[in-house]
Every structure is written in structure tokens, then in C-alpha cells.
Image (tube, rainbow, N blue to C red):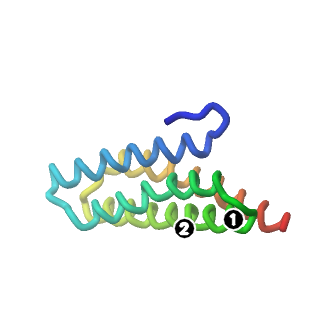
Amino acid sequence: MKLKNNPLQNKSYDLALLIVKLSKRLIKENKEYVLSKQILRSGTSVGANIIEANGAISKADFSAKMSIAYKECLETKYWLHLLKDSGDLDIESFKDLFEKADEIGRILFSILKTTRINK
């Protein structure tokens, strides 16, 4: 689901795909069901809310959806830390996923600052 003119949407989709694969691996290899579901929910919700924001019917609706995407991104980073610190996620995978989530978070924060200034 790549879009030429929407790098944020593409980055969030790529992150979601990696999170889906991580969740499947955590369940299969580690028999880890609780944290894997948590990160699956938050990690895939980022992109879903960005998609919803792009279909917003007002500036307020756009800002609200982007705000939710940002919060879900923060939550995803939390679960990544917890998975790493609990030994369920190796450091290299953590670094890769955290870097991707952090980049998306910084973009979302910038968008939120801009949309709130231009109200």
C-alpha cells in the first residue's frame, strides 16, 4: 500500500508490517501473548489513524486523528522498551524498530505543532 506522495503514510505502513511480523514471532518463538498483542494494537494503529486523518472532514478532525497517531506511536515505543528490557526483543531489532517509530513520532509532532499554530 505504497503512495508516491505520502512518505509518512508509507513509513507508518512499513512500521506496522514489521510490528505484525514481530508479534507473530513473539507468539511463535517466545509464547508471549500479552505484550505481543499490546504492541500489535498500538503499532498498527499509528498508520490507521494517519489514514483516517488524511480523510478528515475538518482541521479539528485532522488534528485529533494525528494526535491519536502520535500517542499510539509513543505507546509503541514504550512496548518496544518493555520487550527489550524483558528479554523478548534483541537489541538490534529494538534499535531498528525504535528508530522507525521515533522518526514517525517526530514527524507527527511537527505536524501537530503546525496544525495547532495555524488554527
Residue found at x 42% / y 62%: 42
Residue located beneath label 1 in the image: 63
Left or right of 34 in this view: 68: right
Q: Position of residue 103 (x, y in %)?
A: 58, 50
Residue found at x 66% / y 58%: 56
Quadrant position of residue 62: bottom right
Question: Which quadrant: the C terminus?
Answer: bottom right
Q: Earlier in the sequence, mark 1 or mark 2?
A: 1
Circle 2 packing at 10 Å, graded few (<14), some (14-19), many (20+), is: some
Residue found at x 19% / y 61%: 32
Q: Amino acid at mark 2?
A: Lys
Asked whether 43 or 103 is in front, the reply is 43
Residue positioned most to the top: 4
Q: Amino acid at mark 1?
A: Ser
Disc 1 to disc 2: CB gap under 8 Å: no
Circle 1 packing at 10 Å, graded few (<14), some (14-19), many (20+), is: many
Residue found at x 49% / y 36%: 1
Q: Is residue 94 above or below residue 1?
A: below
Q: Position of residue 110 (x, y in %)?
A: 71, 58
Q: Position of residue 63 (x, y in %)?
A: 69, 65
* Count of number-bearing discs: 2
Residue located beneath label 2 in the image: 71
Q: Nearer the viewer, mark 1 or mark 2?
A: 1
Left or right of 77 in this view: 11: right
Q: Position of residue 72 (x, y in %)?
A: 50, 64
Quadrant position of residue 108: bottom right
Q: Is residue 88 above or below residue 7?
A: below
Per the model, the C-alpha gap separating discs 1 and 2 is 12 Å
Residue 37 — which label? none
In what element is the residue under mark 1?
helix
In what element is the residue under mark 2?
helix
